[in-house]
Amino acid sequence: MSTQAVLFDAPGPRTRRRHLLYTLIAGAAVLGLVGYVLAVLWRNGQITPDRWAPIVGAEAWTSYLLPGLQATLLGALISIVLAFLLGLVLAMARMSDMRWLRAVAAVVVEFFRAVPVLIMMLFVFYLLTYLTDVEGMWPSLIGVVVGLVLYNAAVIAEVVRSGVNALPKGQGEAGLSIGLSSLQVRSMILLPQALTAMMPTLVSQLVVVLKDTALGYIILYPELLNSVRQMGTRFGNVTVAFIVGAAVFILVNWLITVVAHRLERRLQRRGHIAAVVINHVEQPLEHQPGGKTTDQ
Amino acid sequence: MLETIQEYDYWAAVVNTLELTLWGALWALVLGTVLAIMRLSPVRVLQWAGAAYVTIVRNTPLTMIVVAANLIIWTQLKINLADPQSSTYIVDNGMRLGILAVAVYHAAFVCEALRAGVNTIPLGQAEAARSLGMTFPQSLTQVILPQAFRGAITPLGNALIALTKNTTVVVAIGVAQVSHAMRRMIEFRPDLLFQIFGLVALTFVAITLPMGLVTGWAAKKWAVQR
């Protein structure tokens, strides 16, 4: 069902009046709910003007929000780049002609998709803290990056594989028939086409990575959530700090989503792609782990 | 290793994780269904409110929602989710805050899974319902939603698996469950680091693998024949 308008008839005059009534009731309910929450917060002195005052000042941004955002972006960017590279390697291994390599890659991919990112972060963090000389903020940063890379590489490997599977069979056959080896077919014919079709998915995976850097809060990585919390303590405006912090996260993620949509539309307009990777963007891939999602 | 498992009551932590998963999933399903109905309804305000909820929640980190639930609802507003007189007050309250945060976050994904399920239904179904003279609530409850749930089994199952793994995040507010037990065990027995990680990883494989299998089986069994 492409349009939801088919769920109900084009409304006539009486239905339109009825819908107007529903709109008023629903609007009042939504506004009432939001208003009630705001009123409770206001009465408890959570969102009064004096709580907002520090946010307008420079210190809130230079000492807390901007350094936090910087650390979040740093962790996310390192992770997405490494995850992409490792994901490609895993995908190639999983499509290899050697059975043992395929099996190893399959086990690795399924394992890292099944284990929560936080568990891997905790493991790496404590590993570095207890068993190595790595000091300062490095155990946190490396913990965040390794956790994110392992999980997202596994997810990206599955996206790449499904992208390759979605290509018309003739592409690979044509390559083989002109005498290319199967490795050459994969790396020179299948992968480049699959990657083009996957670009929007990969960009929207960045949203998942960016959100998950907030897990670094638990292993003391000084990312945005951490600085939001410190700012709330420093200025005594926890609720306002969290509202502003959430707004920053939402804004950055929304920008990434817009870029992903643009990219997708441009790819479709150019018509260069041999296949479209289904099941992406609307729902970030984080939420399709386990199961054999990508090829369904 | 076995002593450590017993000393830090690992199996109780596993039970807590399962409890968080169960209640979180139930509330997420209820809230997510309500949101999906809002987004499908003919009333613009409701469509808009549902879309706003999904956009906001889906772009906010779960860790932030969990920490905010604790700091704002409990520390600042002093709203109790458990009886303050009860002897297990702190534990119960933390658990319920965790369930609340997990449910609020995943409801957005349940909503989107159900909308994906609606998209699997051919146009003719809704048109047939309308031509029989069914009203919107009738066609929704008797034609659209039953097929949408059956078509959404795979994305719903994936949301459940994601939710199970995400219950580990409530360690951020000190709720006892697997990741909390893992941290305590490692801090007291760093020499068993690898064994503890292996145990926790296997626990999650053991929980999510059957979920994936059952989802795949159920999606096939209940797929709408067209």
Image (cartoon, helix red, strand yellow):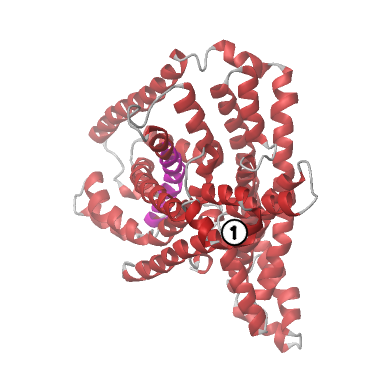
Left or right for B77, reference B187: left
Where on the picture, by quarter, is residue A101?
A: bottom right
Rendered location of residue A36, percent (x, y) = 38, 21
Residue drawn at 45 percent across, 15 percent down:
A44
Magenta highlight: main SS: helix
Closer-to-camera residue (A36/B26): B26
Q: Is residue A87 magenta?
A: no
Q: Does the magenta stretch include residue B101?
A: yes
Q: Which amino acid does label 1 sit on?
A: Phe
Q: Can residue B101 be seen in this view?
A: yes
Residue drawn at 23 percent across, 33 percent down:
A14
A55 vs A296: above or below: above
Rendered location of residue A75, percent (x, y) = 72, 45
The residue most toward the top is: A50
- The residue beneath circle 1 is B197
Q: Quadrant of the C terminus of chain B?
A: bottom left
Rendered location of residue A115, percent (x, y) = 55, 59
Structural crowding at the residue carrying mark 1, measured as other residues with C-alpha within 10 Å and reported as few (<14), some (14–19) or many (≥20):
many
- Range of magenta residues: B97-118
Where on the picture, by quarter, is residue B117?
A: bottom left
B55 vs B19: above or below: above
Q: Quadrant of the N terminus of chain B?
A: bottom right
* Label 1: which secondary element: helix
Left or right for B176, reference A250: left
Rendered location of residue A227, percent (x, y) = 67, 30
Residue drawn at 76 percent across, 85 percent down:
A180
